[in-house]
């Protein structure tokens, strides 16, 4: 039975999607006399018309010698912003010459309800092609994935080893903005390293702790939630990680936004407005997020929030190097920490 030469793989698990492309290619080359040539295309909105035209040419050109072309398109949404480009893309999918194939990779949020762009995925499904989601596992699911991966490789893991490895690569961080696309790939590479280290012997939790660097990803939203909830120790813990990996102006901008949101939420609640109306006025469509803002606003007085906002202005001047407020990196880290202690923890400094 011939395989339809069209596939749409979507989700946030980069390794699983890459493996799906390998399997897809394998199913096609099994019907051919020679291996396929991979042609990669990353969508660029500013060059969409040219790129779609080149894609169409590649797919429609018949195979003369050797294997055909497997076109792999990433960032597909940039290629279908304009109606003409979208129509040309859809048309190209109907003109795939024998021996050629198309795989579209839609990287996105694991919470997404469906593939995007939906028109492309629907067209591939209607043609009988493969449409499949690959959701990055987290927590216990990532530990289960690691156990299955080890079994496939013939590796023996002692009890608790998979859980420790999942923790070390950041799989148990629950915040929604945590980057998970590389978790399985990192875990896979760490299994390679552990296998070499143990040389066919069972791998235990101590081996993971000895060889695998802790790579818990810093989460800006986890930090700002900790600030909003006035959880000082948690906020300071996230702050230390974020200052190592996030530009200070970005961190300030997110903090400034959260404090302003809390001030507006507190003011409007005090005036008797309904939460849904407050969210609409603030441009926040998520009911869950508004519930979180209401909870956090209740931890502060408006006066405390205004003071916290005023001190963020001082922090901004320091980061920008305003004359008289210049600080070196160590001093800036200290001032950020003091802002958390003074405002989140409620400790007021006696400033001169």
Image: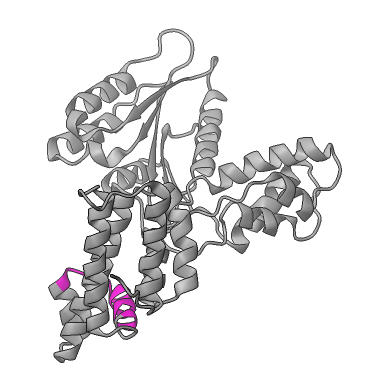
Q: Where is residue 303 in the image (x, y as percent from the top left)?
A: 22, 82
Q: How many marks do you count on the picture?
A: 0
Which residue is located at x 29 percent, y 58 percent?
252
* Left or right: residue 272 compared with residue 193: left
Which residue is located at x 72 percent, y 49 percent?
208
Dominant secondary structure of the residues highlighted in magenta in the image: helix
Figure check: 283 above or below 294:
above
Specify the segment rendered in magenta. Answer: 282-296
Q: Position of residue 15 (x, y in %)?
A: 53, 41
> Is residue 285 visible from the viewing direction of this image?
no
Viewer-proximal residue, 24 or 225? 225
Which residue is located at x 24 percent, y 26 percent?
51
* Left or right: residue 305 compared with residue 245: left
| Residue projecting furthest to the right | 201
Which residue is located at x 31 percent, y 86 percent?
298
Figure check: 8 above or below 2:
below
* Left or right: residue 274 compared with residue 35: left
Q: Where is residue 91 in the image (x, y as percent from the top left)?
A: 23, 32
User: Quarter of the image containing the C terminus?
Assistant: bottom left
Viewer-proximal residue, 45 or 242? 242
Figure check: 341 above or below 5:
below
| Residue projecting furthest to the top | 65
Viewer-proximal residue, 3 or 331? 331
């Amino acid at each position: 039975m011939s395989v339809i030469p069209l596939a749409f793989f979507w989700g946030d698990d980069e390794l699983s999607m890459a493996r799906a492309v390998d399997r897809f290619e394998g199913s096609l080359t099994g019907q051919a006399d020679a291996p396929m040539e991979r042609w990669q295309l990353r969508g660029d909105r500013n060059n969409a018309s040219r790129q779609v035209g080149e894609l169409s040419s590649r797919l429609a050109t018949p195979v003369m010698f050797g294997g055909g072309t497997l076109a792999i398109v990433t960032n597909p949404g940039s290629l279908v912003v304009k109606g003409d480009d979208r129509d040309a893309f859809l048309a190209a999918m109907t003109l795939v010459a024998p021996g050629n194939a198309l795989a579209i990779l839609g990287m996105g949020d694991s919470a997404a309800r469906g593939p995007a762009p939906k028109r492309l995925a629907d067209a591939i499904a209607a043609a009988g092609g493969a449409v499949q989601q690959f959701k990055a596992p987290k927590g216990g699911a990532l530990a289960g994935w690691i156990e299955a991966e080890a079994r496939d490789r013939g590796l023996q893991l002692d009890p608790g080893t998979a859980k420790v490895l999942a923790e070390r690569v950041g799989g148990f961080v629950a915040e929604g903005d945590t980057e998970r696309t590389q978790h399985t790939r990192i875990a896979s590479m760490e299994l390679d390293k552990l296998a070499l280290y143990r040389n066919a012997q069972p791998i235990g939790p101590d081996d993971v702790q000895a060889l695998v660097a802790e790579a818990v990803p810093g989460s800006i939203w986890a930090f700002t939630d900790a600030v909003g909830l006035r959880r000082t120790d948690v906020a300071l813990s996230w702050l230390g990680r974020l200052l190592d990996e996030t530009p200070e102006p970005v961190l300030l901008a997110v903090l400034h936004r959260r404090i302003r949101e809390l001030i507006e939420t507190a003011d409007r609640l005090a005036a008797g407005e309904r939460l849904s109306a407050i969210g609409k006025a603030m441009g926040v469509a998520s009911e869950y997020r508004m519930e979180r803002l209401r909870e956090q606003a209740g931890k502060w007085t408006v006066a405390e929030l205004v003071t916290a906002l005023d001190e963020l202005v001082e922090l901004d001047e320091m980061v920008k190097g305003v004359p008289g407020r210049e600080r070196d990196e160590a001093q800036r880290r200290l001032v950020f920490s003091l802002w958390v202690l003074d405002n989140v923890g409620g400790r007021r400094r006696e400033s001169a």
